[in-house]
Image (cartoon, rainbow, N blue to C red):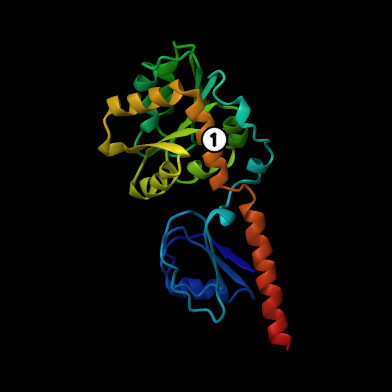
């Protein structure tokens, strides 16, 4: 079996990979094809048309039951009753590289918040402004800076709210029922953020290049000021995502494979 997670992979390369094994799986978030994989997985909630698949009896998996998350996210209990009673921890994370430098932009905004909660800024290994972030927060005991975090699920599970960018982070935070404010790096991230915002699971701050700092501040301050809103957001977020998506995909693949083999043998 071959599993490929390369967006917009040309057909000749797809064909080369499908010839390696008896079963081929392609993971592509937004591509419309054409694909020649036996199975296509689109692990998100975007309302996109089914892709074009050339294989004889293709299997297409998408939606809440097929979100791919690290297995760490299934190890934590969910307890909505603990949310909103006292805001102690705020997690800030804008992905592994944070190409728009949102980690730096958010610091002066967060310094204005009417909150005594600890603020943990988690920086990815590809982010180039680590020293500048440390410099801006070094003399402020309210802030912590975490680099090369090995246990992000644990960090998220032990925070009260998260301020994040879109993409995989939304799904990870939602799977643990953590209320979040989402500042999007690009349009694809905002398309997903809109879905979660409409469901009352997050606060969509908008695309970073289309929103002012004062609006970001106002929305975050509003979020942390209404405990009952945090609890309802948590319930809404948890209802949208399952943390067992990878297991569901594996089960579907096995069922599909067994059926295919039965039909071939008959």
Q: Which residue is mark 1?
A: 234
How many numbered circles does the render carry? 1
Residue 55: x and y in percent read 53, 79
Q: Name the image quarter holding the C terminus.
A: bottom right
Residue 81 in the figure: left or right of residue 220: right
Residue at figure coordinates x 70%, y 80% from the top left: 261
Instruction: Check the picture and name the quadrant holding the N terminus.
Output: bottom right
Q: Nearer the viewer, residue 101 or 125?
A: 101
- Residue 158 or 16: which is nearer the viewer? 158
Q: x%, y% of residue 178?
A: 54, 34
> Viewed as shown, does residue 189 lie left or right of 68?
left
Quick check: 117 above or below 250?
above
Q: 184 or 232, which is in the foreground? A: 232
Secondary structure under tag 1 reads: helix
Is residue 98 at least partly visible in the picture? yes
Residue appearing at x 36%, y 28% in the figure: 219
Q: Work out whether 179 lies above or below 169.
A: above
Residue in view at x 48 percent, y 42 percent: 170
């Amino acid at each position: 079996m071959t599993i490929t997670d390369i967006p917009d992979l040309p057909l000749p390369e797809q064909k080369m990979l499908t010839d390696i094994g008896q079963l081929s799986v392609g993971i592509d978030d937004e591509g419309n094809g054409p694909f020649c994989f036996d199975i296509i997985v689109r692990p998100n909630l975007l309302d996109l048309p089914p892709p074009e698949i050339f294989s004889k009896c293709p299997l297409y998996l998408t939606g809440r039951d097929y979100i791919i998350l690290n297995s760490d996210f299934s190890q934590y209990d969910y307890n909505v009753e603990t949310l909103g009673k006292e805001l102690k921890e705020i997690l800030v994370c804008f992905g592994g590289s944070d190409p728009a430098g949102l980690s730096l932009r958010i610091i002066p905004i967060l310094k204005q918040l009417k909150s005594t909660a600890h603020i943990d800024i988690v920086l990815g290994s590809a982010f180039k402004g680590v020293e500048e972030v440390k410099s801006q927060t070094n003399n402020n005991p309210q802030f912590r800076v975490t680099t090369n975090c090995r246990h992000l699920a644990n960090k998220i599970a032990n925070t009260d709210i998260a301020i994040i960018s879109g993409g995989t982070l939304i799904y990870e935070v939602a799977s643990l029922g953590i209320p979040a404010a989402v500042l999007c790096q690009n349009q694809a991230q905002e398309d997903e953020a809109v879905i979660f915002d409409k469901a009352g699971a997050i606060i969509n701050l908008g695309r970073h290049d289309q929103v002012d700092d004062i609006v970001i501040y106002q929305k975050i301050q509003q979020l942390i000021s209404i405990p009952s809103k945090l609890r309802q957001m948590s319930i809404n977020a948890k209802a949208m995502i399952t943390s067992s998506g990878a297991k569901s995909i594996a089960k579907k693949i096995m069922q599909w494979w067994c059926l295919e083999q039965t039909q071939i043998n008959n």
